[in-house]
Amino acid sequence: MQRELSLEIVRVTEAAALAAARWMGRGDKNEADGAATAAMRESFRSVSMKGTVVIGEGEMDEAPMLYIGESVGSGDGPEVDIAVDPVEGTELVSKALNNALAVIAAADKGKLLHAPDMYMEKLAVGPALCGKLSLDEPLEKTLRSAARLLDKNIADLTVSILDRERHAEHIAVLRRVGVRLKLLSDGDVAGAMAPAFPESGVDLYIGSGGAPEGVLAAAALHCLGGELQGRLMPSGEEDAARCRAMGIDDPAKLLRLPDMIGDDDVIFAATGITPGDFLGGVRFLSAERAETHSIVMRAKTRTIRYVRSIHHLPSKPVALAVAVVG
């Protein structure tokens, strides 16, 4: 992929974040998601690539925009797979809570896993634990191994997990072992990325979340030198058949980074909608301006760029046209 694509893609996440932020704290997650999706789709038009959405807002009959299989980009440039989540954490935006992101990952054509919309069991770690733990191991053994490898007392290990009823057994183990537990209301991608950022204070991310979000997080962690392992969780034969139809012959297979994002280059970009552990949120300023904070990364070079932008909103018709709140 061309390196110029990195900065082109971050312009798209900025547009989505600006559009969604108009709905921050207004209690309407669907409007926030719709505004961000429309802004992201329109912004893609100016990006020099031949992109195909492989992870998006749903199948063609479910989503009018950024549906799986939709072509995005100008039609010139490299052929790439695109994974998007215009608002990762719609509830977070509607309630003005932390860690909502606009997210895109891009890889060479045919490299991104066509992850079905179902749960995926996950284990995400930062560089210090990359390649040293396994999702196949019992959770308690994983926790004790992580503490030993990080040279920490088990009581000083911090683990994050989505606060869901389905995680009751995991949470019971975490409490019994005595680690610090960070319960997340939402934000699956941001949660999985957190162990790769020392400032987050999180050592591991565990539990189940969306499979599409798992692929997005895998792209980010590959760029950051971390790791995500996953296993799809089909609820029955119908789900298993969906996996096979999307090219996943063994739904029970332990998925590692090459299975989810290939073994070549990948680009990841995210813009904060609300403030978070590693990115600031959108701030609307005086004189019709707004501030955004983004991260854009490329696996091939391991370059990590933090982008702080001040936008003149009247010059951003894409974001404004879909984000006006009366």
Image (tube, helix red, strand yellow):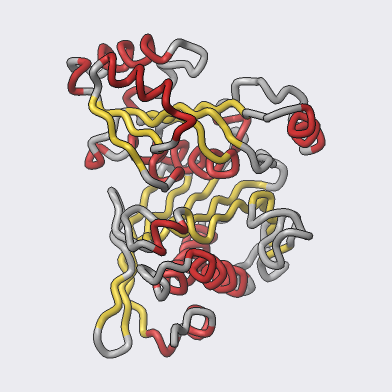
Say left or right for 92 vs 122: left
| Placement of 6 over or under 190, stated as above or below | below
**Residue 295 is drawn in which quadrant?**
bottom left
Q: Position of residue 118 (x, y in %)?
A: 63, 38
Q: Position of residue 193 (x, y in %)?
A: 39, 40
Instruction: Judge whether residue 115 can be spotted in this image.
Output: yes
At a point 45% along the width and 33% down the height, the residue shown is: 165
Say left or right for 5 vs 250: left
Instruction: Judge whether residue 79 can be spotted in this image.
Output: no
Tag count in the figure? 0
Image quadrant holding the C terminus, namely bottom left
At a point 37% along the width and 9% down the height, the residue shown is: 141
| Placement of 157 over or under 94, stated as above or below | above
Q: Nearer the viewer, residue 230 or 49?
A: 230
**Residue 181 is drawn in which quadrant?**
top left
| Placement of 133 over or under 128, stated as above or below | above
Q: Nearer the viewer, residue 3 or 88?
A: 88
At a point 41% along the width and 64% down the height, the residue shown is: 94
At a point 68% along the width and 54% down the height, the residue shown is: 58
Say left or right for 272 vs 104: left
**Residue 150 is drawn in which quadrant?**
top left
Q: Nearer the viewer, residue 116 or 295?
A: 116
